[in-house]
Each structure stands twice: as C-alpha cells, then as structure tokens.
Amino acid sequence: MTTKLRVCLAGATGWVGRGLAPAIAAAEDLELVGAVSRSQAGRTLGDVLDDPKLIISIRATVAEALRVPCDVFVDYTSPEAVESHVREAIAAGAHAVIGTSGVTEEQFASIDQAARARPVGVLAVGNFALTAVLLQRFAEIAAKHLPAWEIIEYGHSRKPDAPSGTARQLANRLSAIRRPEAPVPVGQTHGLKEARGASFQGSQIHSVRLPGFVSSMEILFGLPDERLSIRHDAGSGAGPYIAGTLLAIRKVGSFSGLKRGLDEVMEI
C-alpha cells in the first residue's frame, strides 16, 4: 500500500484554497492534515466550505498547523506572509509549494538557501495554468531569435501586487537568455518615463488592474515590419490552478532547493 503524502494548506478558504482543499482530500495519494485561515480559525473546514467530509480544524497560524506533521506545505496567502510561512515549513522538514504571488528575488534567494540547508524542495509557481506554463516556454524560444520584447500583464482591480508573479517569473527566465534591445533607453524618454512601464530583470513590464480581468499576460516581440504576440488568458474559475497545484504537490519532493515554474517538474 502506497503511503499518502500529508499536506498542510495555508489560505484554505481563499479563492484557490476553497477548491484545492476538497481536491487534496479526494485524491487517493494525498491526505489533508492541516488548514490555515486567520479569518476562519476555530471552525472546521467542512463547516466553512459546506463539505462534511472535511473535518480538519482550521488554525490561525502556520506554526499551529505544523504541529501536525506534514510532508508538503502549500501557501496561497499573501506576499507579506509567504516567506515566513515557507521558512517555518522548511524548519519543520516539509517540502513547500508556493502559489502566492509577489515574492521578491531576494526572498527567493533566501528561501533557496534555507531549503538547501535542510534539505527540502520548494517549488514556486507564478501561474499553475498549463497555458501560462506554455507561454513562458514559447517566449523563451522566441527570445533566442527575436531581440526586442515587452510584457503586458492584466489583473483584477483588487490585485495588490505588481508586477504579477507570473510576469516576474517570465522576465527572470528571459534574462537568462538575453536582455531585450532598446534603441531609445527608458532613461532617455521624453515626458513621463513611467509610461514606459517598470524595468524588471531587463524587461519592460506594464501592469493593468481593472474589473473584468482575472489573470492574463501577453508578451510582444517586434522586428522591423513584423510582430509576434503570445498571450495567456485565465477564466473565472480556479480549476486550472488546482490541477497544477496537485501536480506540484506530487513532484516537489523529487529535488532539494528552490525551483521556479511548473515546467521544472513537467515533461515539456
């Protein structure tokens, strides 16, 4: 009989967590042993999600939830809390999956160092949707042949972080290939330099925050007299993120240190 992977989920009553918690509990090879939600602490997950099978008690803090041993810790909380949460999980000997957006490069470096010292695996994914994963891989191919690009990412009006984790991840990956050409450097722009977007890892990123959007991203490549656009658009449901997170949970124990991007554990 195969031993189930024990999973602790922080952000269990959030947009993704509400669908992810039942999916973990229903999987034959996974077991949900911990749930964190400050707003719903003290209640059972089943009461909050109207699912009587989820008898897990919700804890207010990650430290409380980790008193029950787990194999994999999953974080869908906030940029302000994610680093401390993941460090607590690493200290407890758990692998970690980061679904929270807005983590900085400095935080990633710190998490990587802590994970290698333990050693455990940490998989940080800016976007778990398969189409977003493919966008990043296709963009890497294009950047090898097309020297100029800019990134536009779209989020709902209440999304607090900018650029999004997906856009940061894409810019980071492209920086390993080359820096885009800019005949007129942003610093030499006449007028409002901010209109040219934010420079991150060499790429210009433009963040749009409007009602009606969920999560979308487009990368535009240009050559004289021709253009290439690669775009990902997410729907209103959390299904694609749930499927990707389940894959990440199953794969994160196969390495040590930090890896970024779902394609790091996929056969693409």
Image (cartoon, rainbow, N blue to C red):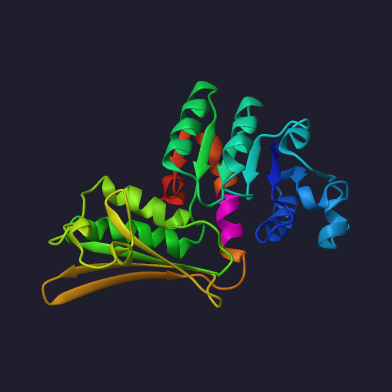
Camera-side residue of 24 and 124: 124
Q: Which residues are magenta?
A: 241-247
- Asked if the stretch drawn in magenta spans residue 13, the answer is no
The residue sitting at 76% across, 37% down in the picture is: 65
Residue 39 in the image: state x and y as whole percent. 79, 52
Camera-side residue of 119 and 253: 119
The residue sitting at 61% across, 49% down in the picture is: 78
Q: How many marks?
A: 0
Residue 184 in the image: state x and y as whole percent. 15, 62
> In the figure, 93 relative to 133: above or below?
above
> In the figure, 120 relative to 189: above or below?
above
Residue 56 in the image: state x and y as whole percent. 84, 46
Quarter where residue 94 is shown:
top right
Q: Is residue 126 visible?
A: yes
Camera-side residue of 242 and 44: 44
**For the view shown, which residue lies furthest in the top direction?**
117
The residue sitting at 69% across, 56% down in the picture is: 17
The residue sitting at 55% across, 47% down in the picture is: 248
Report the predominant secondary structure element of the magenta stretch: helix
Q: Is residue 7 left or right of residue 60?
A: left
Residue 160 in the image: state x and y as whole percent. 55, 59
Q: Is residue 153 left or right of residue 16?
A: left
Q: Is residue 29 visible?
A: no
**Quadrant in which the N terminus appears:** top right
> In the figure, 265 relative to 95: above or below?
below
